[in-house]
Image (cartoon, rainbow, N blue to C red):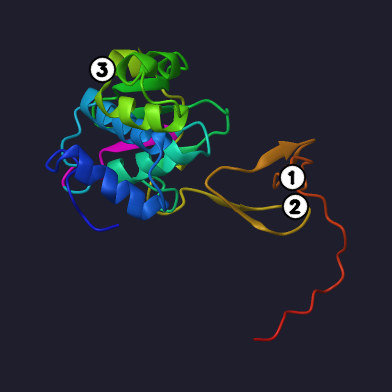
Amino acid sequence: MAKFNPFEIPFEELLEVCRERHGHLCAGQVLGARLALLGLKLIGIKDPYGVDRKKFLVWVEIDRCATDAIQTVAGVSLGKRTMKFVDYGIMAATFLNLETGKAFRIVAKESAKEEAKKYFPEIASPAQRELLAYKIMPDEELFRVEEVEVIFSECDLPGKPRRKVVCEECGETIRDGKEVVKEGRTLCKVCAGQAYFKVLSRRPVHFPSC
């Protein structure tokens, strides 16, 4: 991502950056951008792409449009290990300042959809009404905020893997403390029965030619 400071450009320009990176602008993008700005402010991050880029982590709880906006505004990513995805299906994110330990979880209020009607009652389309209303509604109407303590380990931090072990069943290398110890054996999650897929065939696959 190109470096910029989300606090130093007009909000409409920030949304345009979100639109370019996500592919379209919607109410979820506006909500995610507002959530990210609030989260950064709450933990004291003023330059997320610059001097503060290594000072915080963000946990997101849903794989929806808002998450792309959070990534864009805060400059975090899975690849840099500054963003963590926990699949709760909740429109929420937690921001943690690694230096101070301060952390806040921000949850988007479902009631904001109804509140949006007060701002643009003449607009029949809920999607368009919410897109416009979420730009101007107070944070208090959009979000619920709670101060939290985030439970994580050294293996969750950015940088080189703190630990690598080999699965005793399949021989795959497991990084960052994600192994499972089952009946005294160190296993990957696949071999421990926690796979998200089912193997249909173990025959060699022929790679397609160009």
183 sits left or right of 36 in the view: right
Query: Does residue 57 belong to the magenta stretch?
Result: yes
Q: Which mark is residue 67?
A: none
Note whether residue 147 is visible: no
The image shows residue 123, relative to residue 182, as above or below, that is: above
Residue marked by disc 2: 168
Residue drawn at (76%, 49%) of the image = 197
Q: Please say if the residues under marks 1 and 2 sit with CB atoms less than 8 Å apart.
A: no
Query: In the image, which is nearer the foreground, mark 3 or mark 2?
Result: 3
Q: Of the residues shown, which amino acid type is indicated by label 2?
A: Glu
Q: Residues within 10 Å of mark 2 (few under 14, many from 20)?
A: few
Q: CA distance from mark 3 to mark 2?
A: 54 Å
Q: CA distance from mark 1 to mark 2?
A: 16 Å
Residue drawn at (54%, 34%) of the image = 86
Q: Element at badge 2?
A: loop
Q: Which mark is residue 195?
A: 1
Q: Residues within 10 Å of mark 1 (few under 14, many from 20)?
A: few
Task: Locate residue 100, reporting x and y percent.
Answer: 24, 26
Residue marked by disc 3: 138
Q: Of the residues shown, which amino acid type is indicated by label 1?
A: Ala
